Image (tube, helix red, strand yellow):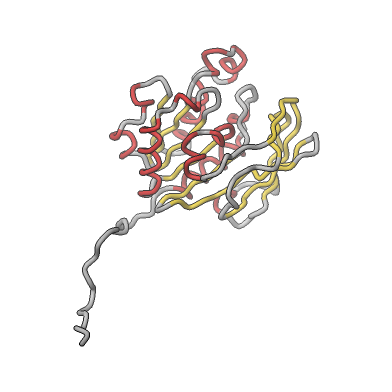
Amino acid sequence: MINVTVWNENRHEQKNPVVREIYPEGIHGAIASFLEEGGFRTHTATLDEVEHGLTEEVLNQTDVLVWWGHLAHDEVKDDIVEKVKQRVLDGMGLIVLHSGHFSKIFKTLMGTSCDLKWREADEKERLWVVEPSHPIVEGIGEFIELEREEMYGEHFDIPAPDELIFTSWFEGGEIFRSGCTYKRGNGKVFYFRPGHETYPTYHNKDIQRVIMNAIKWAKPAERKRPVYGNAQPLESIAVKN
């Protein structure tokens, strides 16, 4: 069974009654709920917990970390970001959702500003599958249509993805690279765009399916980790005259 930690800053839920109505258990609670129904072992963590809920014990037991943040990226402590980064390099999977594009951990792993255009106008989003053979889109049709979402538009200042899984079109005319995979060290990273807090996006069955597929894809490989540093020779080295 895959161990998943769902991290959410949990600030919108405290401040905005619209968000609280859509996600009464928090965005993290909603995601954890459908993951549990999907057969994952889940744990939740939030910003205001000790060590943001991401203690060494929690991180060491996490196969895949799901990250949602927006209002309080700067409040995430740098030493916790460094611990998460090291776990990714060691093999832990990371799924970054929506406004998590501006999180410290995603920007650190990408090495760019991760900036973009945005607009809140209740517009339609159509996420087109552009890599139909990829396991992340198993069970998904040609596209996912969301009646209302926040717009994100290009240019999205990220490194070229290892794989581009989704491209979004918005009612206002913009497009966006909305499903991107990366490998960092021994770990896998998936950025998935939809999920604005005032829309019920995480109740959508196709969005849930993509996140569950992504977790399966991002889980650590079952193998011994590479050994780094000074190494003894595997064969005898002949003495050179």
Left or right of residue 154: residue 78: left
Q: Residue at x 66, y 45 (%)?
A: 177
Quarter in which the N terminus is drawn = top left
Along the viewing direction, whichever of 104 and 56 lies nearer the viewer: 104
Residue 59: quarter of image: top left
Quarter in which the C terminus is drawn = bottom left
Where does the image place residue 48, in percent across and percent down from the top left? 41, 19
Count every numbered label the image shows and give the total.
0
Where does the image place residue 16, in percent across and percent down from the top left? 59, 13
Residue 223: quarter of image: bottom left
Where does the image place residue 67, in percent across and percent down from the top left? 48, 34
Q: Residue at x 58, y 52 (%)?
A: 161
Along the viewing direction, whichever of 81 and 169 lies nearer the viewer: 81
Residue farthest to the bottom, as pictured: 241
Q: Is residue 144 above or below residue 196?
A: below
Left or right of residue 235: residue 92: right
Q: Is residue 3 above or below residue 201?
A: below
Residue farthest to the front, as pictured: 241
Along the viewing direction, whichever of 43 and 75 lies nearer the viewer: 75
Where does the image place residue 101, in percent across and percent down from the top left? 56, 36
Along the viewing direction, whichever of 31 and 57 lies nearer the viewer: 57
Left or right of residue 163: residue 82: left
Q: Residue at x 38, y 30 (%)?
A: 43
